[in-house]
Image (cartoon, rainbow, N blue to C red):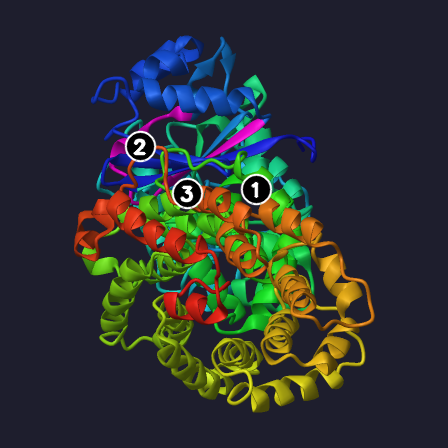
Amino acid sequence: MANPDAMIRDLWIWPDAQGVRWWTVEQSGTLPLTTPWTNDVLPPIQRLCDLGPTLSLGLALAEPLAARLTALLDTADCLRLHLSRDLPAPWADCPFEWLTLGGQSLFGRLIVERQAPARFDPAHPLDPECEIAVLNLIAPDEPIQPADAIADGVVRIYDGLAAVEQWLAETDLTGVGVLVVVAHGTECDGAQPFRLHDGRHWGLPLESGLPPLVVLMACGNDRGNLLVDGRRLLAAGAKTVLAPLGRPCPVAAGAFLATFVEAWRAGHRLDAILAEAQRPTSAARGARLLRLQGRGDLRVGHIPQTNECSDATLVTAVRCGQHAALAELIDRLTLCTLQQGVELDQAEQQLRRCLEIGRDNEPSERWLGERLDAVSETLWPLSRAWVVPLEMLLAEAHDHRRLPRLETARVELGHGDLAMPPTLHHYWSKLYYRTGRYALALHEVAQGLSRLSADESCTRGAGLLGHLMALLVDIDLPAPAAALHQRLDDCLARRTDADVAWERHKLRDRAARIALRQGQVERAATLYRLKRADSPRFKGTGHRELAWLLYIESWRDPQGAAIPLALEVESWLNGLETCTPVPGNADVLYLLRAYAAWAWRSGQSTAIERLERFTPMLEARLFTGDAGPPGFVFAYLHLCRQDGFSGALELPAWAGIATVLEEQRYFLELAAFAALLGEPDWVTPLLDRVDAQRLWREPLAFPAWLRELGLQDWEAVVAERADLERQVLGADVASPETLLVSGLLPL
């Protein structure tokens, strides 16, 4: 057999609205072809035979197909070409393997799987104990008996019509492993394929079912009458049929059967067996005439390889921590998604369904992010095209340490001529959002939304619209964010699917932050109370909502409504034996931020003392991941010091903290802190940088269906808000009350 370390590549081709779609593990594309030939008419088989080794692949096939095959054959020891059963007839009729490349035969280098399943499904190995049955219908007095070439004792041979028909009548063929029919052929179109020694015609009956593999070893005509019968057998339940196009000689037929049985019993795949058998020139009247119809990955074995396991088996293995099973499942979903004619982001939905990971399940999402991180580099390039953006989404939410690797990985990704699904623009925007590169984030969102129609805005576009709201809040454009919220809220109210409750739950957070930007403090607090009450429904603790409630009330009513909330946070913090937050922005960081704001606004020295327990961790977190929450804590502690009360520990210098926040592009928040800390010279330069965050190098191309939100006149929206920011933050004295009612408090 061939070298097990040989480089083997796969090319799948199936019908597409634009002609045919081709697929490899690296990329996918379409070809505007209805036939593989340079001309639409297939040359006669006899003419192809006469041309023999002079029939060049580059001259015979349509140029884009020839180029694709040549590129793959030049980089592989063997290419498996899978031609979907749904393709037009010329694709199955084309004798690809008879062609030459660079003057060299393609036999042994190219194995063609015709009538391949339209949708990939794993082939579990067949039981090695299943019978190989040979139905020998050659007359006993003929001098050459192909069946006699098979080693004794490895198959069951049934000689003569009587024995064959008795065995067929008594046997459930679905329990047989391989069925080989050795006979003379009628070579007649529209007739039974086999000719008995008395001249009668005969065909394999279907009443007793069929085994997975059927081998027809007889003479056929050049028009493929045996291939037609092979399609009949596939339709009746056989997974694969080997049948000749043309007339094999008895000696070569026997040689192939002997080779086949030995290799099959040894557990080799059928396509590998055929490729190796076709390699020698001596196989010209034998194996080289055989065509593989159906699937070529059949083999016998007791233990399935990972790629032979069912989806359910893979899922069980994934849950047991087997990385190879996850990689196989992901790669399989990539192929199946494209075969179904849908965009790559649907593979993520199927992965979530398989693993039962909802978007509302934070522990499961964190687990998935860790598993994807472990297998990402081993995946097919086309799988990485959707998995790396998904990793980005999960890392942004749960583990910022992975973000630099993922950003580097982005430049290596390719989609061929596949359009990037809108969802992936959303995920990439998360990277830029997390690192304060808002112009890039907005550009990604605008690109994603432009790929959607208005009708898709609250289904496939819900994530993009929600993320756009978050971006608009961060860059202080609450008016279009509020209009966008109303649109999305109305859309979600018309949905009844399983995900809509979670979408509405998340929307409350965005609506509350929009309200804060608009100075609508009571509305914001009420929305967070509602969200906190609803969080157990989604297995949430409500701690993030508690943090926001304390933060709001610390600014609005530090000596009143904030006190019970602060006591609740104190109780929770006191219960922490250690504080090593998980990667990402853990709830404890937001609780500490809110508690620090309350310490400043209420003048509570004891609160500062309680916070000092966490300052080593907070200082370390300034330099690992998102510096925002720990930076805000230190900013409020510096405000406490400015107001005349502080703890016993020395704080990190404000200049250092501000530098870290500036590096992570917290310009608007820094401008607010600079105003509160009495550093007016900082405010204007920082607000200039806020303006730069909001402007792309060319006008942002939001779709026309968002026009009513005011996004088309982007520069005017930005200018109006910028005037307010400079008026409030650039004033001689900036009070907490002014920042609160203007919506410019640090968020």
Q: Position of residue 560 (x, y in %)?
A: 52, 89
Q: Marks 1 and 2, how far apart in space?
A: 41 Å
Q: Are marks 1 and 3 in contact (CB under 8 Å)?
A: no
Residue that label 2 marks: 91
In this rendering, is residue 374 above or below 506? Answer: above
Q: Which residue is mark 3?
A: 439
Q: CA distance from mark 3 to mark 2?
A: 48 Å
Q: Earlier in the sequence, mark 1 or mark 3?
A: 1
Could you tell me how far apart the alpha carbons at marks 1 and 3 are, in whole angstroms?
16 Å
Residue drawn 27% across the image and 46% down it: 714
Span shown in magenta: 78-96
Amino acid beneath label 2:
Trp
Q: Whole-percent x and y of residue 442? A: 38, 47
Which secondary structure, mark 3? helix
The secondary element bearing badge 2 is classed as: helix
- Is there a contact, CB below 8 Å, between mark 3 and mark 2? no
**Under tag 1, what secondary structure?**
helix
Q: Which residue is mark 1?
A: 407
Q: Quadrant of the N terminus?
A: top right
Residue type at tag 3: Ala
Numbered disc in front, either 3 or 2? 3
Where 405 falls versus 533 (above or below)? above
Q: Residue at x 62, y 36 (%)?
A: 259
Q: Is residue 461 visible?
A: yes
